[in-house]
Every structure is written in C-alpha cells, then in structure tokens.
Amino acid sequence: MSDGDKRPSGAEDELAGLFALARVTAPEPPDALAARVLAQATAMQGEPAPAVRPAPAGWGGRSGRAGLRIGRWVNAGGLALAGALGFAAGFAGLLDAAPLPASLFPASATQADEVADLNYLTDGPPGASVLLGAAGDTAE
Amino acid sequence: MDGGRVRTTEASVTDHSLQDGAAASCGAGPVADPVRRADALSMERFAAGDRAAARDLTDRFLPLCYRLACRLLSVQAEAEDVAQEAMMRLFAKAPDWQGERARISTWLYRVTANLATDRLRARPTLPIEAADAVPAPGPGPEAALTDRARLLALQAALDGLPERQRLAIVLSQIEGVPQAEVAQVMGCGIEAVESLVARGKKGLAAALGPQRGALGFGGEDE
C-alpha cells in the first residue's frame, strides 16, 4: 500500500473518531431554554376553556331568573313607549306646520314651463333675490 | 469548495415546502411510516390544547434543534435563539400539520438549518473566542483536555466549510441522520448529499491536517 493510499484512510479514521466524539458529547439544551420554549408553547395553546359553571341554586338562582324576566318586560316597555312618543311627535309636527305659500306651486306643469325669463327667481321666496343677486343691478 | 459555495443559495428553500408536497416525492411511504403517524398525532393533540403534548414535543425535538444549531453556529446564545424560533414555528404549524408529508424531525432540521444559515449570513466573521457551543467532554483531566481540543478543532474546521457541506456533514456524520432524510432536508438527491459529504470530509481533513500532532493523531505523518 502506497503512502497515497495510507494517508486518506488514516485521515478518514481520524475524522470518524472525531465525529464519534462529537456525537457522544452532544450539547444539551439548557433547562432555562426548555422552560422558555414550553412556556411559549402552552401560551400558544391558549388558556384551557373554562368549565361551564352551573347557575347557583336556591334564592340566588330564583332571583336571577326573576331579574331576567323583569329585564325583558322593561325592554319591551321601553320599546313600546319610544314608539308611542314617536307617533305623537310626528302627528304634532304635521298639525303645527304652517302651510307653504301657494305661489311656490305652479297651477300646472305647463305653466311652469311657460315662465318667460329668469326674473321669476327674484320674485320667489323671500331671500332668494339676496342669494342670487339682482341681475339688473349688477348690469347697471 | 467553490461548488459548495455556489450551492449555498439552495439553502433558502422555504420552510413550508416539506409540508406543501415537496417531501412526498422523496420520502418513504406516505401512510406506512409509523413515525409520521405518531408525529401527526402529537401535533393534533397539541393543536387541541393538550399540555402533555406540548411537553412531549418540547422534550423530543428541542434537543434536536439545539444540537444542530450549536453545530452550525458555534455560539450558544445564537443557537438558543434559533432553536427556540424553530420550535415556535413548529407549534404554529400544528393546526395545519399534514402527517403524511414529512416527519417532524425532517421539517425541524430544515427550519433550523435555514434559520442558522440566515444568522450566519447576517453576522460578521466569528472570532475564535466567541465559539462557546462546544460542550465539555466527560471526566478524566488529560483525556478531557485532548477531547476538548479535538472538539474545538473539529468545530473550527466545520465553521470553515461551505454551508451546505457543513450541513451535510453535521446531519449525516454527527447527528446520524440517514442520507435519504438528509436529502429531504436539503432539498436535493442522495447523490448530491454523498458528494457534499465527500467534499466536506476532504475540507475537514485539509483543515485538521496541520494540527494532527497537537491533537494526538499520528504525528509521525507530519
């Protein structure tokens, strides 16, 4: 066997020995790391679902159910009252409203189309001329 | 060496591909593997909120992540971070885990290797004194000293290898992972793994050669 054959096999054995040594002296994760990982794992799982707690028996249970019943009636009564008030307010508003000036309503659609010029805008409701400006004034 | 360096870009294979179908083509039988079935059951129990499953998964797989991270990074603090992150990713994957796709160990090796590779690429050159992830050997002062020196030399030589050669050597030669599984982890064929291991061994032998006498290996060769 030549030196060239001998050297690689020797190096191979030495490497195998080093690998074996590394295997048997494998680093172990520190306890603190394991505890950290486990804590995070359980945190990722979330809190365990709480057990369903039965309603307390006896006086507390009865009062609770009575409270619920009362609450339902209060809710229904509140809704009915609000509805009635809404109706009343609506009717009162209609009765008190002042009638709109008749000039705002043309006698017919054709009459509205026959308006000759834009001056009718200034003859409209009070304030309209102020808003639009008097066309004649600005022209002068 | 250069070939290995070029191949390092392949290390960025996504962590999900093993669970997204890539592994199905190169693994053992999809349903027959009892390890995968057990893994899937553990993940299912974890996802359902079983605390015992959380402890079981941590006990079984944290050492695996930590060992690989130590071998690849050489720095204990970084190895702890990487191992913890890998485990968190595993737990986050639990609700969607597909047992027929891959073993947990295979998936974790890949995730850990990718996280470690990211760390390696982001950090500047590692000073020798920073390497503290080599454990102290057993009792016996003289033997322990020699073993310690050998382990440090091996770790330094591993640090000098291209990433993929280092990963192939660590997984197949030190962790004892079967080459088929190493191929799955690395996303390549078994022949490619064999080639990486062979080149890695050559690189290690070249790096350790000058220290053979000091390490107690046949000093007459020098």
Image: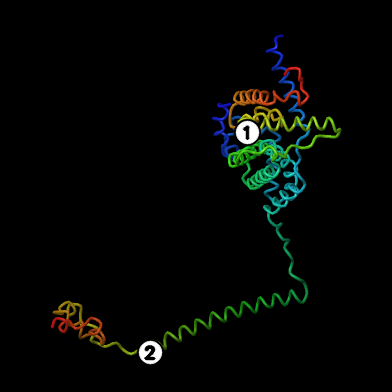
Indicate which disc residue B148 carries.
none
Circle 2: element type = helix
Q: Amino acid at mark 2?
A: Leu
Number of the front mark, 2 or 1: 1
Mark 2 sits on what residue?
A95
The image quadrant where one finds the N terminus of chain A is top right
Q: Position of residue B133 (x, y in %)?
A: 72, 39
Write the residue at 64% across / 36% down. Answer: B102
Using the image as rendered, state which of residue A100 and residue B185 is in the foreground: B185
The residue under label 1 is B185
Q: Position of residue B50 (x, y in %)?
A: 72, 50
* Image coords of residue A79 (percent x, y): 54, 79
Residue A123: x %, y % from top left: 20, 86
What colouring method underlies this structural image? rainbow
Query: Badge 1 local density, few (<14 within 10 Å), some, or many (20+)?
Result: many
Q: Amino acid type of disc 1?
A: Val
Q: Image quarter for residue B206?
A: top right
Does the residue at mark 2 contact the one at mark 1 (Cβ under 8 Å)? no
In this rendering, position of residue A39 left or right of residue B198: right
